[in-house]
Amino acid sequence: MEQPQKETDAIRQMRHQPAELDAIDRKILGALAEDASQSYAQLSKVVNLSAPAVHDRVKKLRREGVIKGTVAILDGCKLGRTLLTFLVIDTSSYNATRQLLTFSNRPEVEELHTIAGDGCVLVKVRADNTEALEAFLMEIQSLEGVRSVRSYIALSTFLERGPSPD
């Protein structure tokens, strides 16, 4: 019997299983989502538990992958990347789609998703200016198997956030 081939690509598709979270876990996550620099003592006041108990819960949430990391949220415009664009890319093959996934290491790429619908890949790009965006688009369009690229430039951003723990 033939064994299934192991995936060797640098980017692997993940199967997601929801974690079992109680109301206290969700309160902790909500507080950390607002300000991840809060101490365990500060969080303990929010959820009415001791600081060591909060610490144990946060460790568990990290271990289970609910908390993926603690990061600073940077303002792209203040960093000089003022042109926010969403790209919907249609490809002719799975191989072309996998090639696009290698763009995840590019600093101007903030998000990269395979999608169902009119396209195959959705990319959130933050470029310095129109010239930089055009160069990036030309690079994508030169890939074999890319059928079309539709660009949607954001004029204003009213809300950007991660998922809510509720």
Image: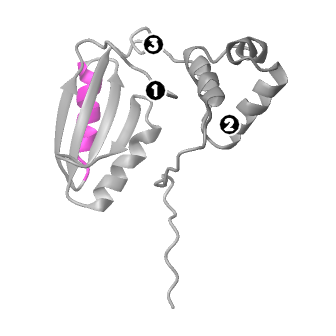
Residue 51 shows in this picture: yes
- Element at label 2: helix
- Element at label 3: loop
Residue 134, given in percent of the width and then of the height, sits at 23, 28
Residue 100, given in percent of the width and then of the height, sits at 34, 48
Query: As shown in the figure, which amino acid type bears the numbered disc 2?
Result: Arg
Query: As shown in the figure, which amino acid type bears the numbered disc 3?
Result: Asp
Q: Left or right of 157: which side holds 109? A: right
- Disc on res. 75: 3
- Disc on res. 62: 2
User: CA–CA distance between discs 2 and 1?
Assistant: 16 Å
Residue at the image point whose x is 39% and y is 34% from the top = 111
In magenta, the rendered stretch is: 130-143
Q: Residues within 10 Å of mark 1 (few under 14, many from 20)?
A: few
- Disc on res. 162: 1
Q: Earlier in the sequence, mark 2 or mark 1?
A: 2
User: Which mark is in front, 3 or 2?
Assistant: 2
Q: How many marks?
A: 3
Residue 160, given in percent of the width and then of the height, sits at 39, 19
Residue at the image point whose x is 71% and y is 16% from the top = 43
Residue 135 drawn above or below residue 13: above
